[in-house]
Amino acid sequence: MLEVAGIRKTFFAGTPNEVRALQGVDLKIEPGSWVNVIGTNGSGKSTLLNAVAGAFYVDQGRIKLDGTDITRWPEHRRAKLIGRVFQDPFSGTAPTMTIAENLALASRRGQARGLSLALKGSRKGELRDRVAAMGLGLENRLDNPIGTLSGGQRQSLTLLMSALIRPSLLLLDEHTAALDPKSADQVIRLTQQFIERDQLTTLMVTHSMPQAAFLGDRVIMMDRGRVVHDISGSDKKRLRPEDLLSKFEELRRANQLDESAAEMLRAQYV
Amino acid sequence: MTLLIGSLTIGLILSLLAFGILISFRVVAFEDLTVDGSLALGGATAASLIVAEWNPILATLAGALAGATAGAVTATLHHRFDINRLLSGILVMTALYSVNLRVMGKSNVPLLSHPTVMSYAESLATTLFGDERMVSLSVWQAPGRDIAALLLMFVVAVSVGVVLFAFFRTNLGLAMLATGDNSRMITAQGVNVGLMTTLALFIGNGLIGLAGGLLAQYQGFADVQMGIGMLVWGVASVILGESLVRSKKIGLLITGAVMGSVLFRLLVAIALRWGLNPNDLKLITAVAVFVALVLPKFLSRSSELVRRPSRA
């Protein structure tokens, strides 16, 4: 279970480039729940994910995972509990190393790494089975460098790696955005398969309204560093992509109204 | 013949230096400039301890440990105090010049009247070749002591290479390889990149210190200047090795480092034999590294130019 309470983050504070990326976000995710995060560019959705992953420390607020306060844990320590897939297919794997070596690295995520052989015969057999289960035919290419694979294949493997040891929380940061439609479909199918099989608690940022509407059991919409909509239960089940689009439209109008109202006030009183 | 054997031996000793550079520059992608200092530190420490009647092997290992510590300091300056990588290395290298003078108490420690690892080579020669001073190798003759030293250094270089190769197949070694390949990925897999880099520079500069200790004993003295230019020398060996093996696999890179180091030393010996002024050696080494870095890009561009008309 993830509990985020009142987190705030300002980048470049006190400079003209100041960005208030998170302005008090509260979020509680039940174990086994799959939450999609949507929002316009700069709404703070990726920042929220990175705050949970530990890419930076928040200015205020607390982050708890499985009852443990991880607010001050460095990124590599949080990896013990958190599996991640990035937007860039090149971020999640080590390109000059083979598929088997990458998987061997992931099979010790967050654990001590000692001087025992990383790829013993039996271990390699296990990994081969896990890769074969994805149905991409990569099990015969375990000794190829991962850099020779396509973006979709690399992203599928990153996904497998993030779930090789069951994570307490899975973070997906627009992990299909950089892929062609066919590979994106494939990666989404695998995502569903892994999450459902292991009942993973998941936080997924997405730009795709169909993904947000049809996958998972809850959607939150962010705007200007805050959560502005939180849809779950039967409302989420009835949700269609168009509903989300109209919510975006509402937000846009509201923001415009704010702007014009501010303009009017300035004109009259300043 | 003596010249050939001598340069092979030095090439093998300096392949340990090439291993160290391979680990810092290639494996964890850290441009570590400690090298010139840590090599001399290894030599200075080993020589001073040998003069203080230590067992030569223990003294050599102590030199390696000293070099390793210097590497760890460089990494710590970068990761703990956020100092730029190059500057961290330069700071430590500069400081080490004074440290080395302190360790030796003067700028040069001769070892000729003390038992060193080369004494082992001499007793090995006696066992192998009896009391004959010159040994015939088909048509050539060479001093038995030199041949034994060559054998000894061959065994050392190959054993260290094999141990390194084995290390890079362990869980820890694999994580170190990934640190240079994709630090974002390995962080997400729970590895502390700062700590891993520190370990890599510890091991790398340990090997460089080992090279320094062996070199001092081979040439019969340690000198505060003995590290100057060694970084570029090692980089040249690694690049030469890479172009020989044409692979990114760590096993081949390790083999390539040995081959590159020996070949480079041979080329230098030949050049000197042909009348190259030794004073120009470092200039020529630097130019050679420059050419090795630029040549592949130039070649791929010119091959494109050659191919283009045929496509049209």
Image (cartoon, rainbow, N blue to C red):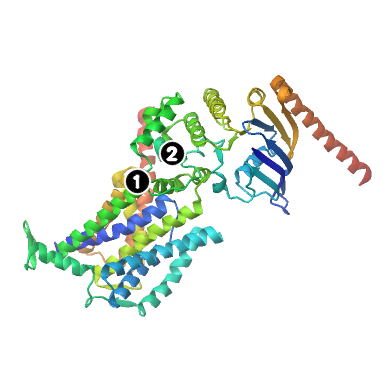
| Closer to us: A19 or A119 | A119
Query: Residue flagged by tag 2: what amino acid is it?
Result: Asn
Q: Is residue A56 above or below residue A241?
A: below
* Residue denoted by label 1: B250
Mark closer to the observer (2, 1): 2
Q: Amino acid at mark 1?
A: Ile
User: In the picture, residue B104 is in which quadrant?
Assistant: bottom left
- According to the picture, the residue beneath numbered tag 2 turns out to be A102
**Location of residue B105 in the rendering, given as x and y in whole percent from the top left corner:** 37, 80
Specify whether A163 is left or right of B304: right
Labelled pair 2, 1 in contact (Cβ < 8 Å): no
Above or below, B173 against A124 in this view is below
Residue A151 in picture, x, y percent from top left: 49, 31
The vertical placement of B245 against B220, above or below, is above
* Circle 1 chain: B
x then y, percent, for residue A261: 87, 37
